[in-house]
Image (cartoon, rainbow, N blue to C red):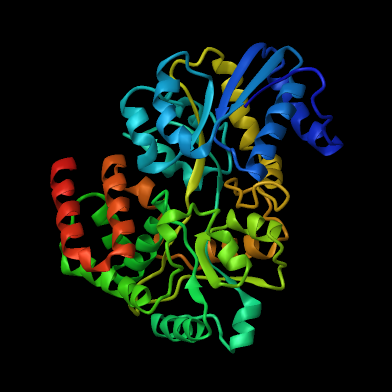
């Protein structure tokens, strides 16, 4: 999908115009074409990206914004080619290890100077996620909590409360299974959803620091502590806690099991809320809880993946790219695009406001007050790309064939020794 914005762009709200006038004045000389490639292909994010492009275009009369939106899964294999041949100016990607290969290949521009110049006031707390080799290579525009989204009405029907411990989790799951339902829906066809389960089980079993040591290749996959993580996971698998045939479903295709009441919960990012609501569930039927404690005394680590914009090293309109990144990270825009009517996530700018939305408020409170262990970026971002790919294949295989654990761990350990 390609959109070129110049004439006929949607008129901005008065407040947006006022918020952008100072930036428009500061970058009045912007001209030419700003080319953006985005992977915001799901309906809600796509509308948000199109809005941002149209607004920025209208702020700069002599600038044409050309937006291309590609499928989110396809972008994971296309980005290198796009950045290498006739690169756009700005692209969507991810923080932490996921940006590493493109930094190492010289495909992302070093924008440390812009950070140092104060372009991104209010983003200091997340600067580390965009740092490699002491330099900054992009900006974050949104992040979101992971956790357990569940059918509160079914919990009430079965007399269940939100579990705070693993024992309570297993007890709840047994009641749910006995009622003819699965405890959890999940779609592992694209593998990464299994990574979320491993993240939480490992952080809760062994702690955030151990989890990151494993991600850095400092711990063997055959370590007994890793085996304990899988033993805890297998408790849910053996009791029928997950929907059948999940390896055949994408994460979206697994949503109807929860919407229809065949499963009661989904361990997922907050982006799922919009689709659950669109599927017909009301906020009276939905609720959220933090993944329960397994090992007492371990500070709770959380997955809070950070989505990012980067300037291609071969960008042709660097001035416009810089202005766009400053615009996207401004407090007003951050508040608006992360609200429930747009991305439904959390603003990264500390000077922004969190929307009056039940799940955003719960996520903000959890990440700011009850994630003392640390903030992980997610399995496929914290592990090097090749290790993440091999690892997630093993995690999915374990969910389907848990008896294969020894073979899986030996393969992952062999990959660790080779890759690191």
From this viewpoint, is residue 220 visible? no
Q: Position of residue 269 (x, y in %)?
A: 53, 57
Left or right, residue 173 beside residue 23: left
From this viewpoint, is residue 417 visible? yes
Q: Residue furthest right?
A: 14
Instruction: Give the residue displayed 54% in from the left and 17% down from the top.
Output: 318
Instruction: Give the residue displayed 48% in from the left and 31% down from the top.
Output: 116
Towards the viewer: 22 or 309: 309
Left or right, residue 215 beside residue 194: left
Left or right, residue 98 beside residue 152: left
Image quadrant where residue 324 sits: top right
Instruction: Give the residue displayed 35% in from the left and 62% down from the top.
Output: 198
Towards the viewer: 248 or 235: 248
Q: Position of residue 376 (x, y in %)?
A: 40, 55
Towards the viewer: 290 or 197: 197
Vertical placement of residue 61 versus 70, above or below: above
Q: Position of residue 15 (x, y in %)?
A: 83, 38
Q: Position of residue 171 (x, y in %)?
A: 44, 86
Q: How many marks?
A: 0
The quadrant of the image that shows the C terminus is top left
Vertical placement of residue 190 versus 73, above or below: below
The quadrant of the image that shows the N terminus is top right
């Amino acid at each position: 999908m390609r959109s070129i914005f110049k004439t006929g762009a949607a008129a901005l709200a008065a407040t947006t115009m006022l918020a952008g006038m100072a930036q428009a004045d500061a970058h009045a000389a912007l001209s030419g074409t700003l080319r953006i490639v985005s992977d915001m292909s799901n309906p809600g994010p796509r509308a948000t990206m199109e809005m941002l492009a149209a607004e920025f275009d209208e702020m700069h009369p002599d600038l044409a914004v050309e937006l291309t939106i590609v499928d989110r899964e396809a972008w994971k294999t296309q980005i290198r080619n796009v950045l290498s041949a006739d690169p756009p100016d700005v692209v969507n990607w991810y923080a932490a290890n996921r940006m590493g290969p493109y930094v190492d290949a010289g495909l992302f521009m070093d924008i440390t100077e812009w950070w140092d110049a104060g372009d991104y006031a209010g983003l200091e707390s997340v600067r580390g996620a965009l740092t490699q080799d002491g330099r900054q290579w992009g900006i974050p525009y949104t992040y979101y909590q992971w956790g357990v989204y569940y059918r509160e009405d079914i919990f009430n029907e079965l007399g269940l409360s939100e579990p705070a411990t693993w024992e309570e989790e297993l007890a709840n799951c047994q009641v749910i299974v006995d009622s003819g339902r699965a405890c959890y829906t999940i779609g592992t066809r694209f593998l990464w959803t299994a990574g979320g389960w491993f993240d939480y089980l490992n952080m809760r079993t062994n702690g955030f620091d151990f989890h990151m040591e494993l991600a850095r290749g400092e711990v063997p996959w055959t370590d007994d502590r890793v085996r304990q993580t899988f033993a805890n996971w297998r408790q849910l698998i053996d009791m029928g806690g997950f929907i059948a045939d999940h390896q055949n479903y994408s994460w979206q295709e697994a949503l109807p099991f929860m919407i229809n009441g065949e499963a009661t919960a989904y361990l997922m990012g907050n982006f799922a809320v919009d689709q659950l609501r669109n599927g017909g569930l009301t906020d009276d039927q939905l609720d959220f809880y933090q993944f329960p404690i397994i090992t007492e005394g371990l500070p709770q680590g959380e997955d809070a993946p950070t989505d990012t914009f980067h300037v291609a090293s071969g960008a042709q309109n660097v001035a416009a790219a810089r202005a766009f990144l400053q615009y996207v990270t401004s407090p007003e825009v951050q508040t608006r695009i992360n609200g429930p009517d747009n991305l439904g996530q959390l603003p990264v700018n500390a000077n922004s406001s969190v929307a009056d939305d039940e799940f955003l408020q719960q996520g903000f409170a959890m990440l700011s007050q009850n994630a003392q262990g640390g903030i992980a970026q997610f399995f496929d971002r914290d592990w090097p790309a090749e290790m993440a790919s091999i690892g997630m294949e093993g995690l999915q295989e374990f969910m389907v064939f848990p008896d294969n654990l020894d073979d899986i761990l030996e393969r992952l350990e062999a990959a660790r020794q080779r890759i690191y």
